[in-house]
Image (cartoon, rainbow, N blue to C red):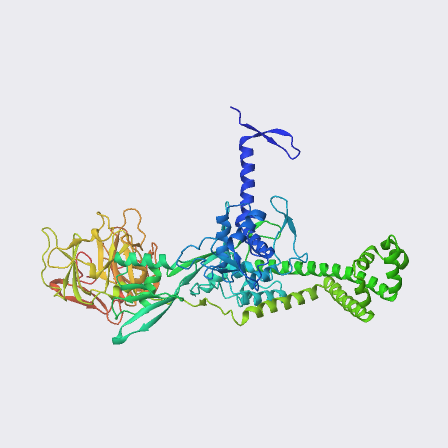
Amino acid sequence: MSDDVITEDDNGRIIDTAFSAALSERYLAYALSTITSRSLPDVRDGLKPVHRRLLFAMRQLRLDPGQGFKKSARVVGDVMGKFHPHGDAAIYDAMVRLAQEFAMRYRLVDGQGNFGNIDGDNAAAMRYTEARMTEVAHLLLDGIDEDTVDFRPTYDGESEEPCLLPAGLPNLLANGAQGIAVGMATSIPPHNVTELADAALHLIRHPNASVDTLLQYVKGPDFPTGGILVEPATSIRDAYDTGRGGFRVRARWTVEKEKGGAWQIVVTEIPYQVQKSRLIERMADMLQAKKLAFLADIRDESAEDLRIVLEPKSRRMEPDVVMESLFRLTDLESRVPLNLNVLDADGRPGVMNLRGALNAWLAHRREVLLRRSNFRLGKIAVRLEVLEGYLVVFLNLDEVIAIIREAENPRVRLMDRFELTETQANAILDMRLRSLRRLEEMALKTERESLIAEQKELTALVGDEAQQWQRITAEIRDMKAMFAKTDSRRTDCAEAPQIDLDAAEMLVEREPITVICSEKGWIRAMKGHQDLEAEYKFKEGDGPAFIFHAETTDKILAFAENGRFYTLNADKLPRGRGFGEPVSLMVDLPADVDIVRLMKAMGEKMLVAASTGHGLVVPVEAALAQTRSGKQVLNISGTARAVACCIADGDMVATVGVNRKLLVFGIDEVPEMTRGKGVILQRFKDGGLADVTVYRSEAGLSWKAGGGRTRTETDMQPWLGKRAGAGKMPPTGFPRPARFT
């Protein structure tokens, strides 16, 4: 079977083409058609073809803001029949979105009837709803009859449609856009039009203004559903500078006090494009699954205004902590992406930044101004020509009437007798005779002078770029005045509070416990602070490894030989006087890896070390893990293993090797890291590192001596040196094997 297919060239000739080449060509044509004719908005008017056709069809139906409503089905039918050869459902869905207050920052369609709601309910059928344009839509269409934009034939060639709209406001950024094309997508959040106007005015004065300067006017997205923008300023700047990024948006909430000290949280605004019913449904499912254990109830008390009531399980909890937990677990906080992928003035798709998008709109407004001015100049020229003819009629009224009454061809006779143009002659002949009697010379001259003055003004405007920008500045200020008083910013900008506590932890009653862990990794917690020197029961062949006091609200850190820290919740430890449970059942601790140190998370920093003599200082917070797999802190390679971990509360470090050589140096020689191999603490010819500790120089170095005694040595000058030294033999009586504890 041949791989060739038969195709036609531009001249209609049949040629043989490879199947792969023909397929690639057709797929590329389809992709470009989807990108340019369906999915991506034009940077100048911010509309996709379907939205542009909807507004144009509504204008043809004279559905102006001050006029009555008409059935949505009528609008959809006109769009589908004249301009948009696609299904009515897709057209109606696009129209519905333009009418939704929670979807559009500035609605383009004024809907009457059920156009859906924030719960995600669908709009009523198009035969039941009615629509007309809003003032914003009228502003987008203003001047379309004055040759301000190009028109093209419709899909069937029976009429024409605009290639774009004059766009009296920066609709692309004001209302945003979403779309998925072939191989690319766009996602533009809405913004406040007064802020965009201020930024545009600044760009007119300073065409090369930086994005940083423009962000002094544009604070960030402004969503129709409100909310609070908590994205860091640096991320916002990077997003607008590159045209790609995202914004964290949180719900707006308040606390309502009740009698007896009780309180409840009321959510009044939710993030953009989050369906209220789905949000509450998911939260209810999580509550039932005990994933929101800090909540007692969730209620939807919304009427005209949104009102979601969250009732805490305990009044002891802090509202900020509860909400921080909900932001992490639910869609009360969501991320709105920014991908400013649009079609430029030449119809090419590309990603623009904030300055590029505003400059493109300003360039379009200048083009609209020039075309509108030239159109008006043409109309003035025609009218002046007609007025000159009227003045001739006024001066020779009787003769003109006689020619009209008696001449066989009055048009030609008038042109010959008074040297009139065909346009002037036709205008005279089209007038009623009684109108000829009412012609007044002063009125004609006044109108002519007015038109001449306007002509001079427009001619100067067309020839002077500075005047053009002055006119555009005035237009933008007028547009801004339409929204300034009634359109305040809905989405506030704030910083997310730094709260580390989990609301679920606040439900844990604080009780003293004694944590016991055996040599083989069996762990349990006994109620109260027991005697640490007492004898405890262990399985046969097993014995004590770690015993310490803690609280049920503590985090327990387990440092293993593989250099990982594992985190245990003290309240989750098995209770009772039995043997407990293996630590490996609670975390993903490998069977061949032992625990080096078990302790409660306290202090600010820890010192960890490996058998190779390498070590580092790590913040305690950096060692806490949120998952069973733990967190890798000390990198281990080969046959090496982690051997020591201690609280870094002091100014001196003491290390001792398997060879019993002791070295003391300042802790400032050890770098602080969140993960790594670290630096060499002590060098060894053989054996490796045995133990490490941190102490205060004024208190001295302590270690366990024989008979359960503790020895403290304050004069460590003989062993004082620099990091990575070999060390010296310890004082007499230092324990064997070499350990500090």
Q: Residue furthest right?
A: 417
Please provide percent x and percent y for residue 643: 24, 55
Lateral position of residue 518 relative to residue 27, left or right: left
| Quadrant of res 262 | bottom left
Q: Nearer the viewer, residue 500 or 35?
A: 35
Lateral position of residue 599 relative to residue 436, left or right: left
* Residue 507 appears anywhere in the view: yes
Seen at 67% across and 67% down, the residue is: 470
Number of disc labels:
0
Q: Nearer the viewer, residue 205 or 40?
A: 40
| Quadrant of res 373 | bottom right
Please provide percent x and percent y for residue 127: 48, 53
Image quarter of the C terminus: bottom left
* Residue 656 appears anywhere in the view: no
Lateral position of residue 320 relative to residue 76, left or right: left
Q: Nearer the viewer, residue 246 or 690?
A: 246
Q: Residue furthest bottom?
A: 260
| Quadrant of res 578 | bottom left
Please provide percent x and percent y for residue 637: 31, 48
Please provide percent x and percent y for residue 531: 12, 66
> Does 56 sit above or below residue 731?
above
